[in-house]
């Protein structure tokens, strides 16, 4: 099937089999390997991308559904040459250890902060409940999202 | 994780075209809505549908509408997340929004649809008890026309519904309800998030402010029978009575007796039955206490 979609603000036109998972399309066909596969069944959130502005598990989306879609992955998070404030906050606060869950955590945090630029700890825990991290114990991830929110509120970052 | 097999996919833009595709291609096809059940079945269980009909390009199947007659339409493609955050649903039926919020993660809820969840007929589906407690109806369209089936009679067993293979679920309709309707949905599961229910309990009833009389009581149990079931003896125990904790306890005991749970890897039947009693009591009292402001407050409520 021939599909046209937007990936990180770039128009893409491709011939892809219907059954190719969005995750595999990104990683294997396009070479955007920032998005990770954890469980493959929608439990861990490592493969989270924004599909038409909303966070979804890319391991459960078929390419055949994607014609006309707008997709943002971790590769599209940074603002020009600068890291996004969420990325900076994760770096500064130690919100990443092994780093495997981090792209998913960052995309989910972006989705949360797009909707709510002043989340409580409870809001953050609720939003990130579909993103598993086996290293950090979550405390520093939550701290990083709170710090990112503070920066975003003061600087009006997109 | 295993990959899906090559797939024939159709993307009709109308119900008529979808019906024609089903007729032409015969049995063995599957509908695709959010894909959170279908794609997992293809990956984990090796399901290979003969073909897939993606319903998402059909106009008019998505979204929540308040109708002039006081009913609310949930298009079959309405996502769980849309139900969870809808200002209309949160205001009128906060327990329905809550039941949607209990499903998977936000990532899953952005994809999973109410129609897909009903059509897949998982006994532990969270929104089904809440919708049945509201007296909701399923609108179904097939080659021979449209029909409406009360959701209470829609499920036949795990994965089984009253729909035939050439029919499409198009809408869930919530009837007009009384202003004094209160309700609650409690999902009882080992973890607070990202888990399936051991027991799900939805209650809805009209509560008179003056004398706390309960009328029009509906109590629906999930995950403790092959389909969601109404606990009619528990409803009768509460009907027309003034609400007290003792009465809620009695209704809970009746619901436990009516439930038909199985023992499996998740829980024993005895434990599930005991929890039906406890959660039904709690749901009845929570409903009268009004919606919690946050999930932490909700979790910490204990009766």
Image (spheres, rainbow, N blue to C red):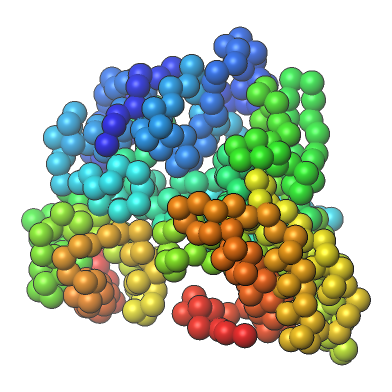
Quadrant in which residue B60 is drawn: top right
The residue lying at 39 percent from left, 27 percent from top is B46
The residue lying at 68 percent from left, 84 percent from top is B289
Residue closest to the eye, B241 or B149: B241
Q: Residue furthest right?
A: B240
Left or right: residue B77 versus residue A75 is right
Q: Residue furthest top?
A: B24
Left or right: residue A87 versus residue B142 is left
On the rendered image, what quadrant is the N terminus of chain B found in? top left
Residue closest to the eye, B222 or B89: B222
- Residue B49 in picture, x, y percent from top left: 47, 21
Left or right: residue B246 versus residue A30 is right
Residue closest to the eye, B194 or A145: B194
- Residue B76 in picture, x, y percent from top left: 62, 42
On the rendered image, what quadrant is the C terminus of chain B found in? bottom right
- Residue A101 in picture, x, y percent from top left: 20, 56
Could one spot residue A72 in this view of the protein?
Answer: no
Could one spot residue B32 in this view of the protein?
Answer: yes
The residue lying at 29 percent from left, 31 percent from top is B2
- Residue B154 in picture, x, y percent from top left: 73, 41
Q: Is residue B292 above or below residue A81?
A: below
The residue lying at 88 percent from left, 80 percent from top is B241
- Across the whole image, how many numbered discs are drawn on residues? 0
Quadrant in which residue B224 is drawn: bottom right
Left or right: residue B243 versus residue B183 is right
Q: Residue furthest bottom?
A: B210
Q: Is residue B207 above or below residue B171?
A: below
């Amino acid at each position: 099937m021939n599909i046209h979609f937007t990936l990180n603000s770039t128009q893409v036109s491709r011939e892809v089999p219907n059954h190719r998972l969005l995750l595999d399309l990104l990683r294997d066909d396009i070479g955007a390997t920032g998005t990770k596969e954890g469980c493959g069944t929608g439990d861990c959130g490592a493969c989270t991308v924004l599909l038409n502005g909303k966070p979804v598990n890319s391991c459960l989306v078929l390419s055949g559904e994607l014609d006309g879609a707008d997709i943002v992955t971790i590769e599209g998070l940074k603002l020009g040459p600068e890291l996004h404030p969420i990325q900076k906050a994760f770096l500064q606060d130690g919100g990443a250890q092994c780093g495997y869950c981090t792209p998913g955590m960052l995309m989910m945090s972006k989705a949360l902060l797009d909707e709510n630029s002043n989340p409580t700890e409870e809001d953050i825990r609720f939003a990130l409940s579909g993103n598993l991290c086996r290293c950090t114990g979550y405390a520093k991830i939550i701290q990083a999202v709170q710090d990112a929110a503070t920066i975003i509120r003061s600087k009006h970052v997109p | 994780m295993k990959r899906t097999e090559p797939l024939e996919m159709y993307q009709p833009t109308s119900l008529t075209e979808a019906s024609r595709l089903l007729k032409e291609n015969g049995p063995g096809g599957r509908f695709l809505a959010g894909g959170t059940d279908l794609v997992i079945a293809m990956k984990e269980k090796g399901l290979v549908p003969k073909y897939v009909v993606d319903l998402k390009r059909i106009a008019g199947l998505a979204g929540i509408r308040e109708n002039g007659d006081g009913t609310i339409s949930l298009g079959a493609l309405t996502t769980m997340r849309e139900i969870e955050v809808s200002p209309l649903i949160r205001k009128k039926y906060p327990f329905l929004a809550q039941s949607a919020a209990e499903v998977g993660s936000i990532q899953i809820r952005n994809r999973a649809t109410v129609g897909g969840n009903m059509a897949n007929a998982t006994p532990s589906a969270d929104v089904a008890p809440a919708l049945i407690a509201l007296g909701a109806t399923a609108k179904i369209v097939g080659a021979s026309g449209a029909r409406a089936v009360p959701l209470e009679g829609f499920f036949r067993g795990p994965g089984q519904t009253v729909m035939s293979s050439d029919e499409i679920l198009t809408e869930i309709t919530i009837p007009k309800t009384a202003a004094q309707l209160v309700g609650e949905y409690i999902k009882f599961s080992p973890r607070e998030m990202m888990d399936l229910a051991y027991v799900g309990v939805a209650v809805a009833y009209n509560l008179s402010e003056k004398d706390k009389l309960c009328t029009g009581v509906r109590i629906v149990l999930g995950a403790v029978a092959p389909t969601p079931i109404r606990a009619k003896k528990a409803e009768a125990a509460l009907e027309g009575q003034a609400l007290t904790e003792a009465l809620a306890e009695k209704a809970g005991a009746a619901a436990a007796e009516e439930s038909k749970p199985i023992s499996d890897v998740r829980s024993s039947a005895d434990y599930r039955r005991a929890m039906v009693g406890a959660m039904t009591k709690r749901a009845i009292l929570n409903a009268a206490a009004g919606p919690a402001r946050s999930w932490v407050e909700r979790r910490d409520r204990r009766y």
